[in-house]
Image (cartoon, rainbow, N blue to C red):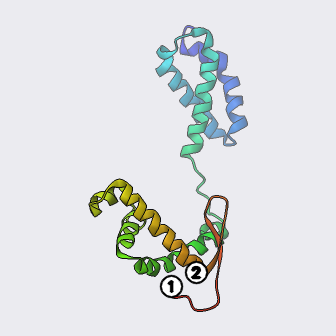
Amino acid sequence: MNTIEDVWNKYHANLLAFIRKRVNDEVAAEDILQDIFVRVYSRIDTLENRSRFESWLYQITRNAIIDFYRSHKSLDELPEWLEQPQIDSEETNRQELSLCLAPMIQQLPEKYRHAVQLSEIEGRTQKEVAEVENISLSGAKSRVQRGRLLLKEMLHDCCKVEINAKNQIVDYIKKTGDSKFC
């Protein structure tokens, strides 16, 4: 191929057919084709192996089609059932149980309460917990783990909790009777 005009003459029809199979909009297909030839013209110097020109050209074409779909998201109105995000029951259960955890955390002994507060609520690393508490890293890890264990015991004291294989709460039922934590 000597010029971009030679490339156009040889590949125009085939590339347009390739694009039309993937893009239903005729005008968009023509625009994509024009964009491809601009890319080819501006990047032809980067092609190291001229014998691979055709595969290089089709890779540019595939990328241009992907770019088209990324930039032209549908602006149609969404159906009403899609507009309102619906929270699944597992998420609802986690949210409800999280409301119970705050009072439970307050019932923990001071050293565990503060470690759990820093680690789980504030999202600090255990190393940061150790620095704030002025204790060793292993001491911070122990406090956080012990605090978690105590919270788990409190939760199981007031609720029957179903946990999935990923150790996530799937469902729960409050136990009848008086629990001092719920």
Residue 162: quarter of image: bottom right
The foreground one among 25 and 110 is 110
How far apart are labels 2 and 1 at the CA level?
8 Å
Nearer-N-terminus badge (2/1): 2
User: From this viewpoint, which residue is outermost toward the bottom?
Assistant: 178
Decide if residue 132 is on the left or right side of residue 121: left
Decide if residue 98 is on the left or right side of residue 108: right
Q: Residue at x 56, y 38 (%)?
A: 67
Residue 25: quarter of image: top right
Asked which secondary structure carries label 2, the reply is helix
Q: Position of residue 109 (x, y in %)?
A: 39, 76
The foreground one among 121 and 49 is 121
Callout 2 amino acid: Asp
Q: Position of residue 86 (x, y in %)?
A: 62, 70
Q: Residue at x 58, y 83 (%)?
A: 158
Callout 1 amino acid: Phe
Q: Residue at x 42, y 81 (%)?
A: 107
The answer to whether residue 171 shows anywhere in this view is yes
- Give the position of the N terminus as an image quadrant: top right
Q: Position of residue 77 (x, y in %)?
A: 62, 63
Asked which secondary structure carries label 1, the reply is loop
Q: Which mark is residue 181?
A: 1
Asked if residue 134 is positioned above or below residue 105 in the image, the reply reads: above
Asked if residue 82 is positioned above or below residue 105 in the image, the reply reads: above
The foreground one among 49 and 77 is 49
Asked if residue 68 is positioned above or below residue 53 in the image, the reply reads: below
Residue 91: quarter of image: bottom right
Q: Which mark is residue 157?
A: 2
